[in-house]
Image: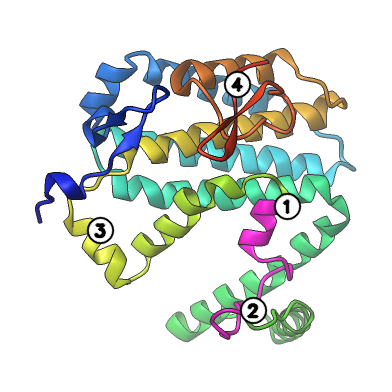
Amino acid sequence: MKFSEEEKDNRENDDGKKESDASTPQTWAELIEWRSNYPDIIHKWLQVMGRLILRTKVRDDDELGDLIVGCMFASHRDINDLMTLSHTDSHHGAQYCLRALFERIVTLKYLCQKPEYLQDFKDYDAVDWDQIINGISESFGISMEPEAREDLSKRAAELRKKNKQEKCSVCKNQRPTSWTRVDSRQMAKLVGLDHLYLMAFTIPSKLMHPTLWGTRDRLTRNTPLYNTLHCMHHLLIEILMIHRRHFMGKQYVTPIMGNAILDFLSVYVYSQTSFDGVLRRGQERNGERIYYGF
């Protein structure tokens, strides 16, 4: 499928001049030509994440801290997989990893803001186990002891009832049961990550599921490498900030947080978010507030 010049994405630069979509890197080779040090930057911060994971000592009574380290470990793998796919120009595949990363960090940030819901999140594990045990039983005829199985089913049913979602006001469909009644879009807005929702959740969801839109997009030459890596880089900083703020016990900008944000700005020049108030020099561009530095 070919696109005419009129159909190509056109953007305005800071001087108000139109830019061709060719100015945005959409292959790994174009990315390296645009920012040759980008892989080194991401590698550096993956190493930092690894060291933090290994060296962080979590108190026995710090359940949130334990979850933060676990999510950081999982996110480290998500980012590594995403970069591996991007390196081979499998950019649509990289979006699957991006959605997982986005949902994990949105959920973690929400729990950090509202730790009173941590137990609800943990309890919902019974529903996941119930589904898995059901599948194993149906496929292989293997199950738990009857008393334990009955107890698990009872707890799962109670949690499903407790967290039953209201119907969507737009499509009128029943939302899937989750550990919270706050849907993913609301949660992203509450934690200040709603500006990533389109690129990191909506579009990857259309690609993951058997939608006509997603199928057609896979057939086109559209390759969302730039947007995917931009979102991933932002989320990498978010989890570093979550970790530092929790384990340092203070809300100031630590050296790791500051250097990670500066590396981000060295690639993308400006940000659509202040990173929770870290970047304070805001300006307006196309009706949106953007941030350039400390």
Q: In the image, which disc is placed on residue 261?
A: 4
Are discs 3 and 2 less than 8 Å apart at CB?
no
- Local secondary structure at mark 2: loop
Q: Left or right of 6: which side holds 66? A: right
Assess whether residue 63 is covered by the magenta stretch: no
Q: CA distance from mark 1 to mark 4?
A: 21 Å
Q: In the image, which disc is placed on residue 217?
A: 3
The residue that appears at 62% across and 60% down in the rendered structure is 185
- Local secondary structure at mark 4: helix
Q: CA distance from mark 1 to mark 2?
A: 40 Å
Which class describes the residues within 10 Å of circle 2: few (<14), some (14-19), or many (20+)? few
Instruction: Tell me the magenta residue range.
Output: 169-190
Q: In the image, which disc is placed on residue 190?
A: 1
Q: Left or right of 255: which side holds 10? A: left
Can you give x and y, in whole percent of width and height, for residue 176 in the image? 60, 77
Residue toward you, 276 or 44? 276
Residue toward you, 169 or 156? 169
